[in-house]
Amino acid sequence: MSAHLALTQLVPFAAEELDKNKVTPGVLGFVVFAVLALAVWALMRSMSRHMNRISFEEPAAPADTAEAGRKTPTAS
């Protein structure tokens, strides 16, 4: 309980030191952004590898025997 009380006493002192017109994300913001950027890069690299393994060539479809045997009616 004393740590919580000490922390609540220090918050107003730290808040007074901040310049309200200039707030930056700081080191933590940079680290979070860098981790997200690395994660996106790794996911894109993995997706590229998986897409390269896929064969997009479709096998030739066998001739449809039902349509080949059917004759088209002629107009008389």
Image (cartoon, rainbow, N blue to C red):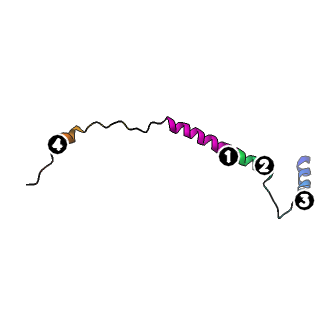
Left or right side of 32 for 56: left
Left or right side of 31 for 75: left
Q: Secondary structure at mark 2?
A: helix
Which residue in the structure is indicated by mark 4? Answer: 70
Cβ atoms under marks 3 and 4 closer than 8 Å: no
Query: Which segment did they paint magenta?
Result: 35-54
Which residue in the structure is indicated by mark 1? Answer: 37
Q: Mark 1: give few (<14), some (14-19) or many (20+) Cα within 10 Å.
A: few
Which residue in the structure is indicated by mark 3? Answer: 17
Label 1, label 4: how many angstroms apart (C-alpha)? 60 Å
Residue at 55%, 40% (x, y): give it.
48
Looking at marks 3 and 4 on the same chain, the residue that comes earlier in the sequence is marked by 3
Q: Mark 2: give few (<14), some (14-19) or many (20+) Cα within 10 Å.
A: few
Residue at 53%, 37% (x, y): give it.
50
Looking at marks 1 and 4 on the same chain, the residue that comes earlier in the sequence is marked by 1
Left or right side of 49 for 19: right
Pinpoint residue 73: horizontal percent, then vertical percent. Answer: 13, 49
Q: What amino acid type should be assigned to the residue bearing mark 3?
A: Glu
Looking at marks 3 and 1 on the same chain, the residue that comes earlier in the sequence is marked by 3
